[in-house]
Image (cartoon, grey):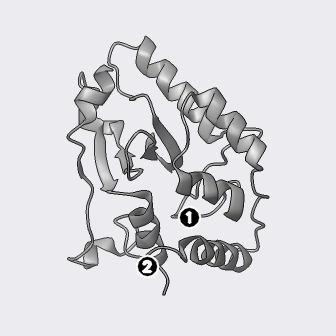
């Protein structure tokens, strides 16, 4: 008997490859274990095990909901470069808004990100939506999924709030305010 979620990586791989084939694009190569370790060293914290496996076993970004996961490493915009950029802007600006350990993994556009809380036990997936933010950075943070596993399952099932016809489905879960945002930003 298999445990719940044991087949998640193969299902994500299958969907990533199927989507890439359908759109005539190629998935990037995977990130090596050394590259993941180097990224963790540069970040100053470990990636959640599932996130590390996605980069090592599926691809270095280039798949996932709508705008697709950012690459962990490499040229151009990466998870690492976006984290550094947001943390710097947050700590140097008048309104702190980006907590340590919250890694942007997908750019939704309009300055919005899907981000993984690498310091939470379940790798909570958060939505950063700064467009209504004024002098309180905490109001820009929402819980998209209680875990990275749940977030990926939602993508695989096609039931995320971001899908085109989400407003036509009453059962589509919507992100809720992240209650820990203020405390985590204040660290």
Give the quadrant of residue 164: bottom left
Query: Does label 2 or label 1 sit earlier along the sequence?
Result: 1
Q: Position of residue 13 (x, y in %)?
A: 65, 72
Q: Position of residue 39 (x, y in %)?
A: 67, 36
- Give neighbour class at mark 2: few <14, some 14-19, many 20+ (Cα, 10 Å): few
The residue shown at (33%, 38%) is 131
- Give neighbour class at mark 1: few <14, some 14-19, many 20+ (Cα, 10 Å): some
Indicate whether 121 appears above or below 28. above
Looking at the picture, tell me which residue is in the foreground, 39 or 169: 39
Q: Position of residue 109 (x, y in %)?
A: 49, 47
The residue carrying mark 1 is 64
Give the quadrant of residue 93: top left
Residue 90 falls left or right of residue 65: left
Residue 183 falls left or right of residue 116: left
Question: Please, what secondary structure does the residue beneath circle 2 have?
Answer: helix
Does any portion of residue 59 appear in the rendered image? no
Q: Position of residue 76 (x, y in %)?
A: 72, 38
The residue carrying mark 2 is 157
The residue shown at (58%, 58%) is 68
Indicate whether 187 appears above or below 35. above
Indicate whether 29 appears above or below 82. below
Location of the C terminus by quadrant is top left
């Amino acid at each position: 008997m298999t445990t719940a979620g044991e087949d998640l990586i193969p299902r994500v791989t299958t969907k990533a490859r199927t989507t890439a084939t359908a759109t005539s694009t190629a998935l990037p190569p995977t990130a090596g274990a050394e590259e993941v370790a180097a990224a963790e060293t540069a970040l100053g914290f470990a990636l959640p095990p599932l996130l590390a496996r996605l980069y090592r076993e599926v691809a270095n970004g280039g798949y996932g909901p709508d705008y697709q996961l950012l690459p962990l490493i490499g040229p151009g915009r990466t998870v690492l470069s976006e984290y550094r950029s947001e943390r710097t802007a947050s700590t140097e600006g008048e309104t702190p808004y980006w907590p340590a350990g919250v890694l942007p993994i997908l750019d939704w556009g309009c300055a919005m990100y899907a981000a993984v809380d690498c310091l939470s036990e379940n790798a909570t997936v958060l939505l950063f939506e700064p467009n209504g933010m004024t002098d309180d950075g905490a109001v820009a943070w929402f819980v998209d999924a209680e875990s990275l596993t749940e977030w990926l399952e939602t993508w695989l099932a096609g039931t995320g709030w971001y899908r085109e016809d989400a407003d036509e489905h009453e059962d589509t879960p919507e992100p809720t305010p992240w209650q820990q945002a203020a405390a985590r930003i204040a660290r």
